Amino acid sequence: MPPASNATRTTAYHEVAAGNNSEPLTKQFHNLNLLNMVERDVNYKKRHLRLTIGLIVLTVVVLGVAGVLTWYFTRSDYLTTEEVLGSVKINAHKLSGSILTKGSSDSQFFQLGRSTAGPLTFTRYCSLDNARALLKDDRYRYLCLLYTSAEQSAAASSSKGAANSAPDYRLLIQVNPSAAVDNQEDFECYDFRWDFPSRLGLTDYFTTDGGHVYGGGQRPLQKWPSNFQPTKNQTVTSEPHSSNGFLNVVVPYWLFTTGVSIMADGTSNTISLTLNRTTPNSKTADPNSGFRFGVNAKDPKAGEPTIQTFAYTLCVGPNVTSVHQNSVRKYRDPTVAGLEEALIERPVWTTFALGIDEHHNLDQEAVASFAEVLQDSGLPVSQIIIDPRWESQPGEGVFQPTFFPNPAILVDSLKARGMSAQLMVHPFIAQNTTEYSLLTADRNTRSYLAQEGGLVGGALIEVTWWMGRAAMLDFSKIEAVKWTAARVKSLFDQFGLSGCWFLGGSSGWLPARRSPGSESAFRRNFFAKFADGAGQVCGGTVTVDVSARFSRKIVRIADARWEPGKTSEENLQSQLKSIIPSALTVSLLGHPIFVSSTIGGNPFVGLNGQLDFQNAEAKYPSAEAYLRWLGAVLFFPILQFSIPPTVFPEDAARHEKYDVLQLTKNLLALRHNHTDYLLRTAQAAAQTGYPMIRPLWWSFPTDRTAWTTDSQYLVGDDLLVAPLVAMGVGARGVYLPEGRWLVAANGQEERGPKWMAVAVRLDEVPHFWRIKAL
């Protein structure tokens, strides 16, 4: 029976009320209520059905929209919203970003956080202390990000999240205010810092976008730029002079032609560098190539940190020259390097080439005769550097009485010739000397000597040096430096010596690490502090053998190593080509004034860095190589000779009929004609920290040819030098950058950019003066 309508129900009600219904009243009301209940139930079900359908439709729509939004905002090509800190932009999810060169629309791509624990997943932002976070100064902007490694995620999943669930990687990028830099609007720096488990390794990657990279350290047979000398996983901040492929100047600083510099913190970790010859474009960046650096995994021992840090400062400027100039001002040692004008005016001569018997002993008479021959030959001399054979045993600190019976007379005779005498000093002490016995007898003074792992009370380190087995003074301890300085000063006062050259500071002399975790920090600390200690020992006139930072101390460029399997001529040719790249690299690493490598090479140094007198004769340079070598370094700050030109008679086998002495004097006279300019440039370099010897791009930072020119250099702002660094040829191509240039040889003016062919005699060095607009 269908439900009654409203009209029917009203009629029925009135009928009941009027008593017109024959049924009992209670029964009529009961039927009416039943009728209403049925109707309400039907309506409720209809409404419920409509509501359910609506909710289902709404849910489908919401889920659909959410799905679309989720897909849209999480698809791989969407995650491009970047956190911006000035010139640095980073995508937190992808750990990739770009560096916008100031004043340019170009950007440089980077990829961070390639971990040995697998891909890193962004977890959340972290914060620093509230006080710093509340600062309103833009100089303190920062970005703090937490990541979980794939390894940890797998471990957490296997244990249902109960263990290792906290992020295990933290990345902090912070704006670094550079108070030491005046022109800050064109120079920005950022501190990058990773903190992660010591048992894992990590690398960061930077492209060069068709540009190039310079720096890191001096390498055997140096190439220019640095990315023309591929390297894979080489150690940068410790153990030069060993198998890691670096020599005596090693600074974790790199410069990009894109207008970026990077200075890594090498005190907390040893930096591992991979650098390929070719670097990809940012759009096809392959993190296995290009510039990739980081720290390796460790196996921390008991009591050692379980968290390691990889930190570096990245700076951005308008171009390669500008960013380097500001970086020098930021990182340089505030003290001004000592500079003797005589060193610029006249070469120094070392006694390595001298020997008086089959044991290659050195004596007082030989040194005096050497000075006499040089003077009588008309060769300029500023200093005679007496090599370590002046001691009978390393570390005795006294002249060998048999061979140097009266050193004061020797020193006085050199002064009478207008020369000064300096000693080569080193940190080694032979175990059969009185000094060694006295030091080791007392617990306090025993600590002056380097001990295994740098641990007090540990076994003393034994070094195999070219003068025999010895212990090594630990110059990371100020007491050891003071003890050595007092002994050297006593020599100065007693014999009137003017200064010293400090050799042997490389941590490569230390034996192989027995426990890498504990010794690595000691070795880095040892090496980094050595140059400072040498300066305190020898005073302002010190020339150091090693450097690990922008110290502005005068450093000696290491002699190139002899390559086995190559003939003498092949070795000399490859060493010739590395002279200018080595000088440019050392100059960029904070040493504006340096001593050239030994002219003609050092035939007395073996493959392992030890002296090798026995085989030296076979490695003597030819006359042509000797003269081309001198031509290559002629305008360097300080010239260093060991082999005198008087030892080159006519060599019939090589058909050389050169008057080597006269040609050498001609070249040195050419340098002498530029003494005033060299002195002004050297003094400015010592003050500013800017290199005296500069790559061509210094004045032409956007010239791509200048980026890779490796056989020419600028001296200061105005002098371009283009030596011939090859044998068997008599001409070379010279590149003149944009501008007007005066050819020194004929006074003609040339306009660049252009290449020109130039004939070069053995006593010539092509050079050109920059003509600046008035």
Image: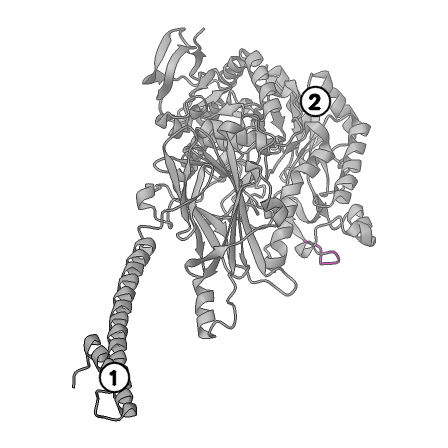
Q: Where is residue 523 drawn, in percent x and y? A: 62, 50
Residue at 22%, 75% (x, y): give it: 6
Is 774 placed above or below 492 here? Answer: above
Point out the tag, 2 or 1, that comes first from the N-terminus.
1
Q: Considering depth in this image, is 23 or 542 the residue closer to the camera?
A: 23
Query: Given the image, on which type of amino acid does mark 2 rest?
Result: Ser
Q: Tell me which amino acid carries mark 1.
A: Ala
Image quadrant of residue 492?
A: top right
- Give the label, 2 or 1, closer to the camera: 1
Residue 153 horizontal/vertical position (percent): 45, 66
Query: Label 1: which residue?
Result: 18
Picture residue at 52% right of the left edge, 71% below the top? 163
Instruction: Identify the mark at residue 420; answer none if there is no mark.
Output: 2
Q: In front here: 266 or 46?
A: 46
Look at the image and give the residue range highlighted in magenta.
Answer: 456-461
CA gap between label 2 and label 1 equals 144 Å
**Which residue is more in the foreground, 716 or 329?**
329
Task: Please say whether residue 466 is visible from this viewpoint.
Answer: no
- Relative vertical location of residue 639 with respect to residue 510 in this rendering, above or below: above
Q: Are marks 2 and 1 in contact (CB under 8 Å)?
A: no
Q: Quadrant of residue 59?
A: bottom left
Mark 1 residue element: helix
Magenta stretch encompasses residue 460: yes
